[in-house]
Amino acid sequence: MNFNGRANGLGMKLLNQSNYKVWRTCMESYIVGEDLWDAVNGNDTSPPADVPKNSSALKKWKQINAKAEFVLKRSISSNLFDHIIRCKSAHEIRRTLDQLFNKKNEARLQILENELANTIQGNLSIVEYFLKIKNLCSEISLLNPEEAIFEARIKTNIIRGLKSEYIPFVTSIQGWAQQPSLEEFENLLSSEELAKQMAGVSIKKGEENALVSNKSKFKRKTVRDRPQSQFQKGSISLGKEGEY
């Protein structure tokens, strides 16, 4: 391992207190690619019996297990080594880490589930709102892959928190014979959002034009109804006799 937080040769960040799910996914892919999966979590997690007839198989198991252990150990932050230092196999290392981090993830999972249940669009744009819901669902799925959140549930959560002004539009879409994908659904709502914004601009502009027109009419009426001065009527007011 090195000191910049990355595992040499693996192209991934070292396991730390906050990235276990991502680390596990990347590590599983790497271990399968190196043909070490059976030693870590497959059919050969335990060594064969140490008897003369198994000497060759035991030697091979030890070699494969040592490779798997090395891969796991060089991808772990140094402050986590105390948790695995007594582990006697790659499988035991993986199981220990899984137990350690899953305890912490239960609390995080509950927080995310609560946040998802309470998320509404509010002042967010359609794009921002979709992104927030999708990010929450993605993280929940990483923490709990056995109950991953798929498109149908993502859509349900999105519709539940939409502004009420979009509900009639959504209801019309739900009546379609072929339902749009999540991406298509987002594009449809974004177009509806833009149409509402343009309509709002047109209404505002019409109101401003009407206000200007009313002001203009009021000014013309005021000028027309204002009494004319005697001078404007063509008469000259004389002062004292002989003065103009």
Image: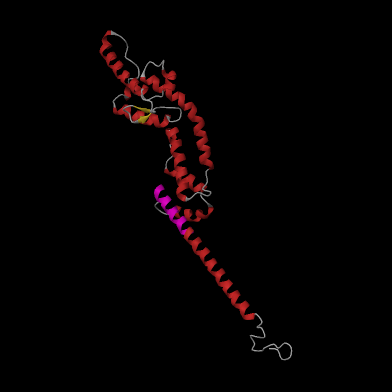
Residue 86: x, y in percent?
41, 15
Asked whether residue 202 is drawn in magenta, I would say no
Residues in magenta? 180-196
Residue 84 in view of the camera: yes
Residue depicted at 52% across the width and 55% down the height: 165
Q: Residue furthest top?
A: 52
Residue 41: x, y in percent?
36, 23
In the image, taking residue 61 as reference, residue 151 lies left or right, namely right
Residue depicted at 35% across the width and 28% down the height: 28
Asked whether residue 194 is drawn in magenta, I would say yes
Q: Where is the N terminus found, in terms of image quarters? A: top left
Residue depicted at 50% across the width and 40% down the height: 116
**For the image shown, how many numbered marks are present on the structure?**
0
Q: Residue furthest right?
A: 240
Name the residue nearer the viewer: 196 or 154.
196
Name the residue nearer the viewer: 2 or 137.
2
Residue depicted at 55% across the width and 72% down the height: 213
85 versus 153 height, above or below: above
Q: Where is the C terminus found, in terms of image quarters? A: bottom right
Name the residue nearer the viewer: 211 or 27.
211
Residue 161: x, y in percent?
52, 47
67 versus 139 height, above or below: above
Residue 181 in view of the camera: no
182 versus 148 height, above or below: below
- Magenta segment's dominant SS is helix
Residue 142: x, y in percent?
43, 34
200 versus 38 height, above or below: below
